[in-house]
Amino acid sequence: VASVVVAWETSKEFIAKEVELRAESKVMGQPRVLQVHERQAMIRAVEAVHGALNEAESPSQDYLSLKADETECNEPVAAQLDEILSKKESSNASIQSSVDPSGHLRVTRTKVKAKMPTTTEEYRRVMKVEMFAWLCMAARFRSKHWLHGLTAEPFLKFVDFILGDRVWGIQVPSQAGESQRLKPDWAIVLAFEYKLRKEAMKLVTNSGHTLADALAAVIRDPDLKEAYFTTPIALKAATSQESAPPNKWLRLTDKGFPWLSNSNKGIVDEANQFVLKCLDMCHEAFAAQGHFILEHPEDLGIVQGERPGSIWQWPELHELLTVCSDPKDAGIVDEGQPFYLRALSQWLKVFEDPDVHWLVDESDSFASGVPLGVEEPLPRSPQVFPPKVRHRKLDETEFNPLAVNYPSGQLSRKELEEKFREEESLGRMFPSKLSVLRTKYGEHRVRVAAMAAIAKPDGSVRPLHDATHSVKVNHSIVYQDQIQCPGPAEIAAVVREAFESREAPFCVSADIKAAHRLVKIREEDWGYTCCRADSASDVVWVNRTGTFGVSSAPYWWAKLCGLIGRFVGHLMQTSLFLHMIYVDDLHGVFLGERKFLDLWIWLLAFELAGTPFGYHKFKGGVASEFVGFNLRYDLTEVGISDKRGQWLIRWIVNAKDNRWVVPARDFSEFLGRLCFVAQLLVWLKPHLAPLFAWTAVVGPGTVGRLPEAVILTLHYILAELVSESFRVSAKAPVCHTREAFRTDAKCTDTFVVLGGWELGSRRWFSLKLTKHDVPYLFREGGGSQWASTSAELLGTLAALHAFGWLVPADVRRSTVVSLSAGTDNQANESLSIKRSSTKWPLMAINMQLSASLSKARLGLRLRWRPRDENEEADDLTNEVFGSFSESLRVPLTLQDLDLKILSLLVETREAFDVARAKAKADKGSGK
């Protein structure tokens, strides 16, 4: 009874507080505060039908509160598009207070709007937020008749109406009798769209329509379309025709607007004279072998069947291209290509470039379209690339020339179609029918690949074309060249070369837009590159250009960008600069007092070739990122970003919190990222063997506890990532080629002796350890002879400390150390090469040694030496000190050594042993 009473009182307080909050919100002119449980219940109800909502699709809390107020009052309102906020872009409303002249406190509410959509993709995303907001209301307010039966379909039809061939895609007959798209003003389209939604809400409020019926009714209303769409675009078109002629230029070489007269013609003539004077200055600079930059709007090329005039077609400008054998031909941009391939060809022929013939001279060239590589192997370029000797075996799959899209692609079919239409406008794709394609190319040469889609933060998708599975296009493509891309060694070398030049650097990381899509494919191979936006549709989309997912795309892009890069290198002549490219990421560093001028010339050279840059992604200075690596020219260091390093740390900590029980798929992702990091943080590499071994024997769907060797390795990696930097020095290491010291170890039943002496100074040490000091070197109830290799390695670690090699440093060093020829001692020489072991306790001591060497930036090469040639170190382990001066003895205890990693691993191993013993005892007792 007491519980019932308490629950009753709590409910009364809760309801009273909710009523108070509602009243307060109404007085302040704010929507009521939506309780967390209400909002979560609505979102869950929608996600149960439509799947998980990302932040770009989920309505913000403020917008849901506003819609909830309107729904409760049965007064739905059509919001302006810039007022429809998602969680991702929400800005909470703020309350401002002021005192009016009468002394009363006035409270006003302000809010920040989002931006209006400027593209069809942005509009679809905003309307998704609006749709999900009203679906949330339908889930919450089931008693509202005007929300009965509301689904996503009315909103989708509404959006399709706005963006379809009735409004945005409306077409009108042309003079040739064909349909031509009108391209109405986007502002008129948005105004018409808002008017329709306003009228729909009026039908709900005044006429008793359901929201679904109201949306369907307004798109069928001819009067609304006539008044708010057809008439405005007609008036807009009429005004435009009266104010300006149809084309910017009448002919290719026209200067200005010939139809102008009087003062207007004088203004244009004056501007033309200014351009001609600029060209005269360029001629003077060229004659003096100087540099110049001429900036002007680009040549538009062929637009709607005509080619508007441009200064880039003027003969005065073509005269500047005298370095080319045929200046007029050099100024031509081949259809479907942004690059001046003919100018590149003429220039590179002067330098006898080994790949220049692929630009325009071959029958299947970059200008006309290169072969996909299905019907013959890709060509060989022995002067550019080394031969490919190993070929990766692709997944075997059942052949199906008409593959079905993956679930991610099918769910994103509208987004894929929008992307394909965008590509069509750029000349990279075109739609067709399967029967037409098979008739044209032959049934066996038409392959429709499965499409997948990756959602991007802006709500659009990145298409993925699978040319491997089912269609087996990639199975037929054979490389003869080994494509080479800059890796950690090359990246470190660029930073090191910049440092060794002793000149001040400035770097730039640039992005080339749609790199793979810049290579034309020959028409006879187009049938191999087909796909569909919707597997249920009979519309097949055909790629005209290189496609991400077709294995030959990176080959041809590497060949083309290599040609462009060599052209830029020739143009830069003796300038101090270095550059490298990895697919669409370009990086350059410029040195000396001319570095900023050289940067502009370098950029101009790429632009001169026609390179389409994504300037919004440019970054640089004295530090930058390039393909996931962090380049610090100011510190002469290279590494990974803090974000990548912190991800690895969080993964290991989470695995530890879950008692090392992990899904194999997650572990594979972690190992892949760890391998990427290990390309630069090389101290990681030797210790990854246990991780690879476990991955190799478990299935991808397995969930299990990691083995002890893997857990010990992860403990070590975590400790190092937390304590060490994510960067390493790029400076050339200081190499000590002569032996630094010699060590030995003696193992008995009761003690271990470590000894070593330094060549040159003859400083020495001898350290005697008992089972209490190093229990991990002794067997239970036995001696330490079995651990001689581990003891030798511990002796090396002691010598490095005693002789001052383990001081933290920024510059890499390397040294050579000799060991005596004991029973297992040759194993330590191979260990220093392999740098990895899974034997206990050698594994733990090796990890401690790696950690100490990493902090000191020291590389160690252990060299095996016969015992007869290492008698001095042997004497020290036998505690015979006659050959050494007592004054040169280095006082050393075990506590002097930094063994934090070793202690951690020993404690972890002991915990494993205790847990194992307990499990056996429980099993024996039947627990």
Image (cartoon, rainbow, N blue to C red):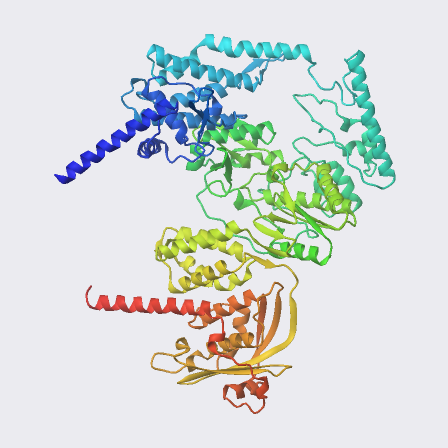
Residue 147 image position (x, y, % from top left)? 32, 20
Residue 533 image position (x, y, % from top left)? 48, 31
Q: Is residue 226 above or below residue 366?
A: above
Horizontal arrangement in the rendering, residue 107 relative to residue 385 (left or right): left
Q: Is residue 122 above or below residue 892?
A: above
Observer able to see residue 587 = yes
Horizontal arrangement in the rendering, residue 7 relative to residue 576 (left or right): left
Which quadrant of the rendered structure holds the C terminus? bottom left
Q: Nearer the viewer, residue 886 or 913?
A: 886
Q: Residue at x 66, y 52 (%)?
A: 385
Which quadrant of the rendered structure holds the N terminus? top left
Q: Nearer the viewer, residue 478 or 122?
A: 122
As drawn, which residue projects farthest toward the left? Answer: 1
Q: Nearer the viewer, residue 248 or 318?
A: 248
Residue 575 image position (x, y, % from top left)? 77, 49
Residue 233 image position (x, y, % from top left)? 57, 12
Q: Nearer the viewer, residue 697 or 120?
A: 120
Instruction: Choose top left, top right, bottom left or bottom right for residue 761.
Output: bottom right
Q: Residue at x 34, y 67 (%)?
A: 911
* Number of numbered discs overlaid on the protein picture: 0
Observer able to see residue 864 = no
Q: Residue at x 62, y 68 (%)?
A: 813
Q: Is residue 728 above or below residue 60?
A: below
Horizontal arrangement in the rendering, residue 166 relative to residue 273 (left or right): left
Horizontal arrangement in the rendering, residue 519 relative to residue 712 (left or right): right
